[in-house]
Amino acid sequence: MTTAPSPHTRSIAWWLIVVAAMVFAMVVLGGATRLTESGLSMVQWKPLTVLPPIGAEQWQTEFEHYQQSPQFQKENSWMQVGDFQKIYWLEYLHRLWGRIIGFAFAVPFLFFLAKRAVDKPLAWKLGGLFILGGAQGALGWFMVASGLVDRPEVSQYRLAAHFFTALILYAALIWVALDLFRASRPPEGEQVCDHRFVGYATALPIAALLVMIAGAFVAGLDAGLIYNTFPLMEGRVVPHGLYDLSPWYLNWFENVKTVQFNHRVLAIALVLFVIALFCWSRLLEMSARARLLITALLHMALIQALLGISTLLLVVPVSLGIAHQTGALILFTLALCLAHTVRAPHALKAD
């Protein structure tokens, strides 16, 4: 933590938490657009446009643009304007919410700069977050554009990149806010920490991030719609055909069977990692905050596993798909908070 505390430190921290919560909602909303196949309903990118179509004439014009898209021509040619509106509104809200997030970040940022409430290191961090948020919006359109050419499917690579960038933005907002909260509190005395536990706890959000990116490839390839059994796939622990594509590494990103298998294995490994970390924590003297976080993390990991299995067995119903993505974000958030907490000198020590 290089940023010096000021009278505005806690206010800035709470503002970043609010923005992070908005990004959380944005990711969940993006998952909903994906699951309802609404993401390709807006075929033009107009970043400065805020209002939706107004009146029958504008709706008809927007619908005519959509009629030129592969999704309409190959999947939704039965649609009329009223049907189109149902999928349009969700994607419109997704994009509008992104603009609102940008406004919610930019205006307070300029205000705090004008008040000289941020020092240079923090100003650089906040500026980087703003640039990352803008890049995230551009990457979102880059993803959508991949589904407007020949096939009504976005590139799984672009989808994973869009999701990854959103998660990095979310994690950075949370981490900087937690740094500011820590700076605003009186310093605590040093204790002897179990540095091995700190290292593994710090690796936990990275592991969760890896599982979530693997899930993005599952979503991008619709891999959750097949092999809807658990724990076996095709009646086997390790199914045949995991490396049928050549070169071999393409299987990790383009072989539907391999992509789903990898997500399963990584998710199971993450749950076991959390359980092991929880059991280890019982042997350590920890702060109340750290103890609460590791316990909540264990419960959330088990809930998330049940959500994932249920989503697979029921062939990805929209409600469960959204719940599964939301659960992943909650798990990721708890992992971030735990990693940040145990890195404090006062957080834990060996018995």
Image (cartoon, rainbow, N blue to C red):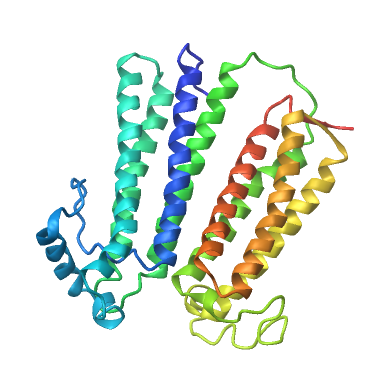
Please indicate whether residue 47 sits to the left or right of residue 255 in the image.
left
Relative height, residue 79 to residue 98 (above, below):
below
Please identify the residue farthest to the left as the structure is shown. 57
- Whether residue 154 is visible, yes or no, is yes
Residue shown at the point (60%, 50%) measured from the top left: 206
Residue shown at the point (18%, 47%) measured from the top left: 49
Relative height, residue 148 to residue 24 (above, below):
below
Please indicate whether residue 61 sits to the left or right of residue 36 in the image.
left
Relative height, residue 138 to residue 173 (above, below):
below
Image quarter of the C terminus: top right
Picture coordinates of residue 240 (x, y %)? 64, 88
Residue shown at the point (51%, 70%) measured from the top left: 218
- Pick the front one: 274 or 22: 22
Q: Which of the 4 image quarters holds residue 15?
A: top left
Q: Which of the 4 image quarters holds residue 271?
A: bottom right
Residue shown at the point (49%, 33%) measured from the top left: 17
- Whether residue 1 is visible, yes or no, is no
Picture coordinates of residue 79 (x, y %)? 25, 75
Please indicate whether residue 169 sits to the left or right of residue 240 in the image.
left
- Pick the front one: 312 or 145: 312
Image quarter of the N terminus: top right
Picture coordinates of residue 308 (x, y %)? 63, 65
